Structures are given as C-alpha cells and as structure tokens.
Image: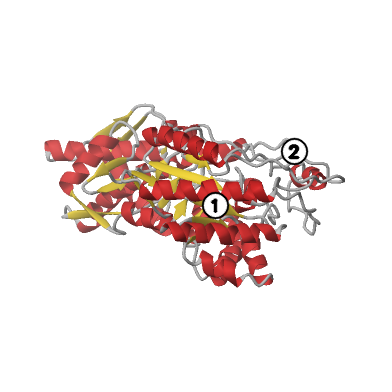
Amino acid sequence: MTDVLLSWDTEDPIHPEADDALLRLCRLLSAAGVQGNFFVVGEKARLLRERGRRDCLEALAEHEVDYHGNCWFEFPEAAMVYGELPWDQAVNRGIEIELNGLHDVAEITGHWPVAWVQHQNNVSAMMPVIMRKCGVRVWNGGFASGDGMLGWLYDEAVISRAGHVLSLQGDWTAGDSDPLNPVTPDRAVDPEAELRNFQEQFDKLAERKSVVVPLGHPTCWEMSEWWGWYEWDDMFHHRVPGPYPRGRQFRRVPRRSEADREAHYAWTRRAVEWLAARADVRVTTFGEYYQRVAEPKLSWLTLEAVDALAAASADGPAHLALAGTTLSAADALGVLAHLFCYITRQGRLPERVPVQRLDGPAEAPWPAQPAKLVRASLFDLAPQVYDQCVERRRIPGVMRCRVDVGPAVAVMALARAWLHYRREGAWPVEVAVEPASALPKAAEMPFFAHPSNASSHAPEGFHSETIAERVRWQSWSYREFRS
C-alpha cells in the first residue's frame, strides 16, 4: 500500500487569482472524496482574511491545514542565519518568529497546523525543535538530502520531501517575461499527455517508495510565473546577513490563458480521481499518517529488553527497534543512565526502566577517545548524564567522570558494564572503550551526512559549516518509524 499525501504550498500573497485557485483545488478534492494537505503561510492566511475570502477558508476547512512559515520570502530573519547563534538563543529566536504565524494560521483557518515545511532549504538544526515546541507534529521537509527520510527526529515525525515528491504542476515552469511587455501565453497544455505522464511517474516512484507526496502551488494553476524581474535581485541577493527588508511592492505577472488554466484543472481532477480509485493507494493526510506511526508517550523496558539495548550499543551508539517501540541513540543513553542511577539511589535492580525521548547534543559531542573507566567512574557518570537529561531534555556533549567523556563513550561503557553484570553477576572492575565515532551510525545517512544550505534565501556567498555540523550531531536523535 502506497500512502499518498496530496500537498500544496499555499503562499502567493500577490495575486488574488491564487486565492481562486485555492478555492477550486479544495472543492476539486472534496468532490473526489479525498483530503488535501495545504501548507499555508501566515501572510497568506492574513491576506485571505483581509480580502474577505470566507469561501476559501470554508473550503479549506474540509482539508488538513499545515504550515509554511510566518511570512512569504519576508522572513524577519532567515533560519540559516540565526541558526548560527548559540543553540537555546536560536531556538528562542525561531519561536519568536514562528509562533505568531502559527497562531494566525490557526485562528484564521480554525485548525492548528499538523505539519510544516521550510521555504526551499532555509532551515537550521534548530527548526524541527522549534516546531515541536510549538505543537507541530510532522516535518515534511529536510536538509536537502538526496533520497530523503522517513522516521523520527526530536520526537517529531519526519516525512521528508527529498526523494518522495512528484510534481502536480505538469510542464509548468517559472518563466521570465519582460515586465514592460507582459504577454499572456496563448498555448494550452494537453490534459491527456499531462495525466499520462503523471501516472507513469507515479508508478515509477511508488515502486521505490512507500510514501509519495504529489506537490504543487495553487498559484501555478492560474499564473504563468512567480513574479516580475524587478524583485528578483532584491529578494535573492542580500549583501549582509540579518533581517530581511520589508515593504517591497511586488508587480503582478501574466496570467495563464483560460484554455491553459482549464486544461490544468481538468487533468488534476482526473489524476486525483485516479489515485482515489486505486486499491493499492491510500490518499491520506499527515495527521492520519502520524496517528498510525505514533508510539505511546511513555514506554517501559524489561531488563531483558535492556539487555538487547546494551548489546546493540556496546560497540557504538545506534538507533534500534525494541519491545514494541523504537529508540534513538540518545534514548538508549537515557535508558542506561536511568538504570544505573536507579541502582545507585535505590540499591537494587528495577523491574522496568522508562524510555525518555531525548534530543541530541546542542554542543559538539566529545570525541570517542580510548578510555578506561573504573567501577566508581561508571556510577559517577550515570547521574551526570541522567540529571542533565532530566533538566534539559537532551544529552550532554561532554561529561566529567575523572576523565572527560562524550556520549559515545558513555553509552558504550554503560552498555558493556551492564552486559558484564548480567553475564557474571558482578560489576566489572574496569571497562575499556576503544576509539569510536562520536556520532551514531545514523550519521551516515544522506539526511545527516550531506546537509545543504544552498538556498536562494541565503545572503550572497553564505554557507555555514556550523549548521551542517549541528545537523550531523542530531543523528543522535534519529529513530525509525515502527513497522
């Protein structure tokens, strides 16, 4: 069964015709008996209210409302720029920017957004944390990695677009017309050819992917391009990092011909009906998908399950599926730290150990250098890890237990000590840990290994290895969807 998430980035604040496209697409989907997922920009929602488009909002109410940022290309500050600030400062800055937009979208549409996606690749490692703290449960974006990802990050479901998207815009391309001589194109797409191409591309993608995200922008059903020449340089070539300029006057662009528009709506309707009629396809929403993959907020592991966790972590931090739940490498470290703290403070073994959903480090994880930890060091180490995790809900980058150790050494040492105890009935006098990566195995995934800041929203020449490195750290937070 292939899950299909029909999605539209609803963002054009310039052209009222884009509002008409939103209305028609919502009604087209409702007539086919399926729900769409509309990623609404805060600025777009405010304009729908300002323009009195109750018809659009009422039609939108039959579908899922998602979030596409507070402002359309008018960010008070780009996430990739403030993402270089200290971690908590950046998180607070992002909440300050986005929470008002989320409230406006919720107030105007009547629905708190379920999912979110960034504009292009204007994203930092903190953005998923910011959205989770604001109550948005699904990230339909990513770090521009080649083949995308399905799984959990920071206890937020990630259904990345990379590798999963199929265009609903057909052969529509953003042209560059002369603003002094705007000409409405007189051609019309061939709806039969467009439908046939969509079906062929869908079947190819569905052979490789369990999730397909057909994606479009409502404005493209009405307008022939995004905007005029005069705005391009001002929007995309900022000379100095910092707040974006506001108050620009955007010029209208040519509209598609009536025949062209109607042909596009026609083949879109047939594509939606074709998907809805297929027995091997489930047209769904991000909210419904989330409910299917969501796990209990609190899970408990038996000591036998902890044995399996320790065996999987003894040679290096790793995510795993275990005892009806999934754990990130950070979760695994939290479980082991809780176990050792319980033993220290209670003087006995627990019956079960709770799973805590922890974030990866907000600072560079200490390299996994060779280390030898005596028994006292192990029982000094666990409370440090646990207390920091409880207080800050994330694993520390470094801990002091007679020697400096990072989370990789910590999880390996605690896992090996526990396995020794279970095998021998006594704690080891010393645990030796050889050199290992400071990052878990998930760091090798393209999603983490090759993050990109190649967005046209960036100041000229901007590329941040700081952001890329912080993205890689968060491989500690990754875990798979439970099958």
User: Which image quarter is the C terminus in?
Assistant: top left
- Which one is earlier in the sequence, the residue at label 1 or at label 2? 1
Q: What element carries label 1?
A: strand
**Residue 116, percent from left and from top:** 52, 54
In this view, the residue in front, 228 or 127, is 228
In this view, the residue in front, 83 or 387, is 83
Q: Which mark is residue 376?
A: none
**Residue 422, percent from left and from top:** 15, 40
The residue positioned farthest toward the right in the image shown: 180
Q: Label 1: how many residues lie within 10 Å, few (<14), some (14-19) or many (20+)?
A: many
Q: Distance between the residues labelled 1 and 2?
A: 29 Å
426 to the left or right of 54: left
**Residue 133, percent from left and from top:** 48, 60
**Residue at image mark 2:** 460
- Amino acid type, mark 2: Glu
454 to the left or right of 241: left
234 to the left or right of 123: right
User: Which image quarter is the N terminus in?
Assistant: top left
In this view, the residue in front, 410 or 272, is 272
Which residue is drawn at the image coordinates 58% and 41% (left, top)? 467
**Residue at image mark 1:** 8
- Amino acid type, mark 1: Trp
Which residue is drawn at the image coordinates 50% and 40% (left, top)? 195
Which residue is drawn at the image coordinates 65% and 42% (left, top)? 188
Q: Between tags 1 and 2, which lies in front?
A: 1
Res. 82 in view: no
**Residue 281, percent from left and from top:** 35, 45
Res. 479 in view: yes
Where 191 sits versus 98, above or below? above
Corner quadrant of residue 238: top right
